[in-house]
Image: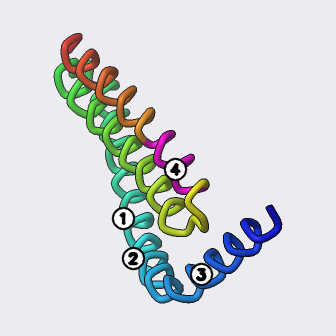
Amino acid sequence: MNDLVLSEGLKNTIEQLVLWPVRVRHRRKARTKHKVRIDALGAVRHTLEGAAKLNAGNARTVFNVGMYLLLLDQDIAYFTDDLVCAIGDRRRAFLAKHEAILLYEASSRGSSTLARS
């Protein structure tokens, strides 16, 4: 048992060292994408509020779907960041399972949202 724990610890340490440059590049790109996503969410929210004031039902539907997709993209990006930075097979499997659940729920909700419109 002790050997298993030591070998897993060694594997995780090597993984941290080898994947360090990949994680640094990913974090840099993720920060830039996060800023763009926040700006896009603000623009869509502002336009959605304007469409609500004008009683523009079809435009509201389009911007509601756009808002939903941007928020879904944000959730997926957070999961991806966590997956890239995860150390160890157990942690990656845990995150991958929950990301799969998110995608499944999003696909079923997304199709029902579009069907209602």
Disc nearer the start of the sequence (1/4) = 1
Where, by quadrant of the figure, is residue 35 drawn? bottom left
Q: Nearer the viewer, mark 2 or mark 3?
A: 3
How far apart are the two marked residues, 2 and 1, measured between alpha carbons? 11 Å
- Residue underneath mark 1: 36
Q: Residue at coordinates 43% horizontally, 35% vertically from top-left? A: 102
**Picture disc at residue 16:** 3
**Residue 90, disc:** none
**Amino acid marked by disc 2:** Lys
Q: Which residues are magenta?
A: 91-99
Give the CA distance from mark 2 to mark 3: 19 Å
Crowding at mark 4 (Cα within 10 Å: few <14, some 14-19, many 20+): few
* Mark 3 or mark 4, earlier in chain: 3
Q: Nearer the viewer, mark 1 or mark 4?
A: 4
Amino acid residing under circle 1: Val
**Distance from the alpha carbon under mark 3 to that under mark 4:** 17 Å
